[in-house]
Amino acid sequence: MRQLQPIIVEEIPHSIKKYVKKIEKVTFPKQGCTADVGILHTSKGRYVLKRAKGEKYKKWLYK
């Protein structure tokens, strides 16, 4: 399975950026095989982003 690049701030949907306000940094825990996970560190707290790999896993994540 192809490896996705780390999640970058510019590709985070505007609605998420508007909700969390200022993103101070993004860190990445150990990654699995079906998704990429990024942790947003903001002045409001921490939030987890998850991006699925492949159509099958995207459908699972969407549900």
Image (cartoon, rainbow, N blue to C red):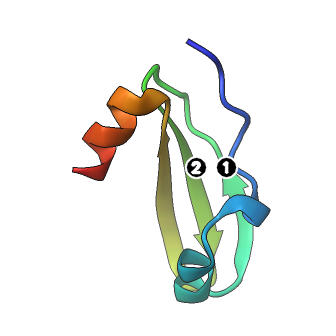
- The first of marks 2 and 1 along the sequence is 1
Q: Is residue 25 left or right of residue 17?
A: right
Image quadrant holding the N terminus, namely: top right
The span from disc 2 to disc 1 (Cα, nearest Å) is 6 Å
Give whichever of 39, 3 is nearer the camera: 3
Q: Is residue 6 above or below residue 3?
A: below
Residue type marked 2: Gly
**Percent x, y of residue 57:** 36, 32
User: Given contact means CB atoms under 8 Å apart, are the residues at marks 2 and 1 in contact?
Assistant: yes
Measuring 73% from the left and 34% from the top, which residue is drawn there?
Answer: 5
**Percent x, y of residue 11:** 71, 60
- Disc 2 is placed on an element classified as strand
**Percent x, y of residue 34:** 42, 26
Which numbered dot is residue 38? 2
Q: Is residue 59 above or below residue 26?
A: above
- Disc 1 is placed on an element classified as strand
Quadrant of res 22: bottom right
Q: Which residue is mark 1?
A: 27
Measuring 56% from the left and 55% from the top, which residue is drawn there?
Answer: 39
> Marks 2 and 1: which is nearer the front?
2
Quadrant of res 6: top right
Query: Which residue is farthest left?
Result: 63
**Percent x, y of residue 26:** 69, 57
Q: Is residue 43 above or below residue 7?
A: below
Q: Residues within 10 Å of mark 2 (few under 14, many from 20)?
A: many
Measuring 55% from the left and 29% from the top, which residue is drawn there?
Answer: 30
Q: Residues within 10 Å of mark 1 (few under 14, many from 20)?
A: few
Which numbered dot is residue 57? none
Residue type marked 1: Thr
